[in-house]
Amino acid sequence: MNNRITIKDIAADVGVSVSTVSYVLNDNKKFTISEQTRQKVLDAAERLGYVQNKNAAILRRGKSNTIGVVSYWDDSFVYSSFIKGIKETAAKKGYKIIIYSAADTVDINDCIGYYRDNMLDAVIVIAPYGDNCKASVEDIVDRLCEMQVKYSVIGETADNSDHSFIINYFESTYVATKYFISKGITDITYVSPPIDVNERIERLDGYNRAMAENGLEIHFCEVADVEKEIDNFRAVVTNKSKTAHQILTCAAKKGIRVPDDFELIAGNTEYYSEYLYPPVTSVVIPAEELGALAAQDVLNQIDGLDNVDAKKPEYKIRFMQSTR
């Protein structure tokens, strides 16, 4: 025996037509229904244990009010900030998000198939990080366009897209280096792992540009050489908080005090930066704002609006001072 509650059961319970129940449950705005009747229908649906066939409702409305997020990141402060910006912006327009955590080895067709099966209204891609991912940003954009999916991309530039919201790695180290220069510091070293991926290239370019603009000598040090070079450091900009942590560990072993013996700024902020000793001053990547911009972009596409020029988020320094 099938005991599934239907809209006919709700209509009989409330004493209204099946059409009225359908209009209420599907939030149909084309017909005027009194607030009292609407509430009775909703109360009856809850009391009777009605479960809506969501796929059928989506087909009727032509939208799911859900945005998919394909993410190749899943373990950083920047990632969680992306998600916060996307989620809060989507919620303001009555949309939910569903996240697909994609490994670097996952084919983009697998991701797209997942979202097609879930009948989503748009897709936001948090782009592959580094150069080892099976799917390039351009490959992903081509596939989305081929399937006529409304989308935006966060993290990397896609030359074949008007819907990219990039992390400006260049700006992160440029801002950090300019801060030291504004304090009158001219002996500034840039420390990074090998410059073998685009993100590291762009960060090094930011440091180089700031130094060149002020006629200062460039000093580059790979992480592997920190121990033998650290006695010469006067001010240091790093590519990331992880590199800053490695420098602090080396300094502690050699009895060098930071920031007394040299100052240090990391080119990004991680959640653990304030718990290091001493806490690391860093550049805040405006990831939450980028997530919000990407979400607003796909919402505009859903609403049939043209691209709206958005104000570029600022990269600011997060100052940390030790209290220990």
Image: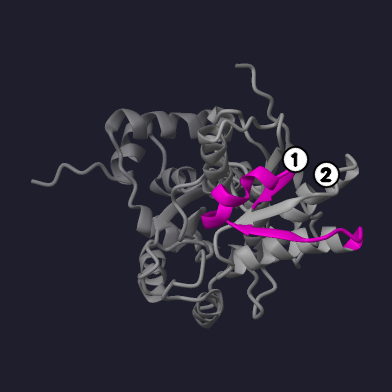
Task: Provide residue 21's location: percent of width, then percent of height.
Answer: 42, 43
Q: Quadrant of residue 33?
A: top right
Task: Provide residue 124's location: percent of width, then percent of height.
Answer: 55, 61
Task: Provide residue 208's location: percent of width, then percent of height.
Answer: 78, 63
Q: Quadrant of residue 184?
A: top right
Residue drawn at point x = 51 percent, y = 38 percent: 249
Residue drawn at point x = 44 percent, y = 29 percent: 40
Decide: marks 2, 1 in contact (CB < 8 A)? Answer: yes
Q: Which residue is mark 2?
A: 179
What type is the residue that disc 1 sits on?
Ile
Q: Residues within 10 Å of mark 1 (few under 14, many from 20)?
A: many
Viewer-side residue, 157 vs 239: 239
Instruction: Please report whichever mark, 2 or 1, sits nearer to the chain's N-terminal start.
Output: 2
- Picture quarter with the C terminus: top right
Task: Provide residue 97's location: percent of width, then percent of height.
Answer: 49, 50
Q: Which residues are magenta?
A: 213-238
Does the magenta-highlighted stretch encompass residue 226? yes
Residue drawn at point x = 39 percent, y = 76 percent: 109
Q: Nearer the viewer, mark 2 or mark 1?
A: 2
Q: How many marks?
A: 2
Mark pair 2, 1: CA separation: 8 Å
Q: Which residue is mark 1?
A: 317
Q: Residues within 10 Å of mark 2 (few under 14, many from 20)?
A: some
